[in-house]
Image: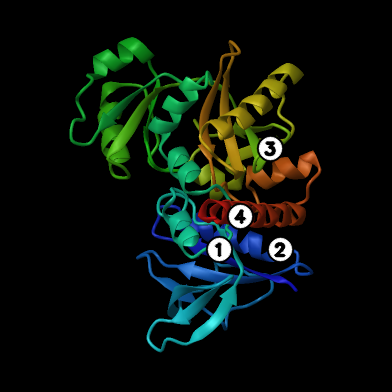
Amino acid sequence: MKIKIAIIFGGKTAEHEVSLKSASNVFNSVDRTKFVPLLLGVDKSGKWFYNDQYAFDNVNLADNDYFAGATPVYLSSNGNTVSVIVAKENHVLVNFNAAFPIIHGTFGEDGTLQGILKALNVPFVGPDILGSSIAMDKDVTKRLLKAADIPVANSYTLYKHFPNEYSFQEIVSSLRLPVFVKPANAGSSVGVSKVTNETEYRAALLTAFRFDNKILVEEAVIGKELECGVLGNEEPQASIVGEIVATETFYSYDAKYIHSDGVVLQVPARIEAHISDTIRQLAVKACKAIGCEGMARVDFLLSSENKLVLNEINTLPGFTEISMYPKMWEATGISEKELITILINLAIQRHERNVNLSTEIEK
């Protein structure tokens, strides 16, 4: 019997449009001999919708509006399945057995959606609540990585209610220019600015505080931008390392998802073998340090002086046609279709492990 897998996309997030592209690619790549995929949308206001009249082949959510003909729904757990129910009429439209959440950023990647799915008692792809919420907060992640002796860039943390706790002069004296200003809780380079003077710094604070109440001012590690995929639960594995060759000043949101000519993806990365080995080891170690199972894309920076730092951990990396995570695994020997199958199976295995643990505790 085929497993019905709900691909949950959209969301109340600055990365809504990226999610549309990722979900389309995942839906079109699912192995139909093993799974029955269905699309479950969350609009920009956070409301859930299901469209049973939407196309089932060669889906393109970015160009064809899923929400236009969709029905408002809510979810209800029903033993080993979840029912998608019409909000007004309370009748079931469809059921599913597992979920592939592909809502990037806030409300989708930060543990919020994971909590909903866990409460529904359904297996879901990607890390659990704790790993998701930790990885989303760059400040908390840095603290845990430091405790695990994993190198990270030096930074200051600022809060919206006290933005001038550290002066520009104090920060520059410690970190030197340029610096990067970024929201603590955001992905895909949303709200990130490169700063070379105090005027740019003030503008960057305003930009970053639009997306979060906590931000980081971080030293710039100028050099290669490197990425490594991690896959697995208790014993995760690392992919071949990839390199981002950006034609812009840094790997921006537009370069990642909109203008593919703004970046070149180099797999494998043009680095020495021992550095590649170090990155792969650190990527796995980092995921274990924050309790991240299932999958993650771990990003590193390597300076011209060979200073290596872990930049961030992405728990629901992009799955668009130009996204690095599936490309790195393809270069490692796992096709995108196989990768999606593995991710769903990992979700089911973790769910069964946790259910069995709960059963043992109750005895």
Which residue is rendered at x = 81% and y = 43% of the image? 333
The CA distance from mark 3 to mark 1 is 22 Å
Residue denoted by label 2: 30
Q: Residues within 10 Å of mark 3 (few under 14, many from 20)?
A: few
Q: Residues within 10 Å of mark 4 (few under 14, many from 20)?
A: few
- Residue 165, given in percent of the width and then of the height, sits at 20, 23
Label whose residue precedes the other's in the sequence (4 or 1)? 1
**In the displayed structure, would residue 177 be above or below residue 297?**
above
Residue denoted by label 4: 356
- Residue 44, given in percent of the width and then of the height, sits at 38, 64
Residue denoted by label 3: 235
- Residue 255, given in percent of the width and then of the height, sits at 54, 43
- Secondary element under disc 2, as helix, strand or loop, is loop
- Secondary element under disc 4, as helix, strand or loop, is helix
The CA distance from mark 3 to mark 2 is 24 Å
The CA distance from mark 4 to mark 1 is 14 Å
Label whose residue precedes the other's in the sequence (2 or 1)? 2
Mark 2–mark 4 CB contact (< 8 Å): no
Q: Which amino acid does label 2 sit on?
A: Val
Which residue is rendered at x = 45% and y = 53% of the image? 15
Which residue is rendered at x = 43% and y = 71% of the image? 48
Q: Is residue 40 left or right of residue 211?
A: right
Q: Which amino acid does label 1 sit on?
A: Val
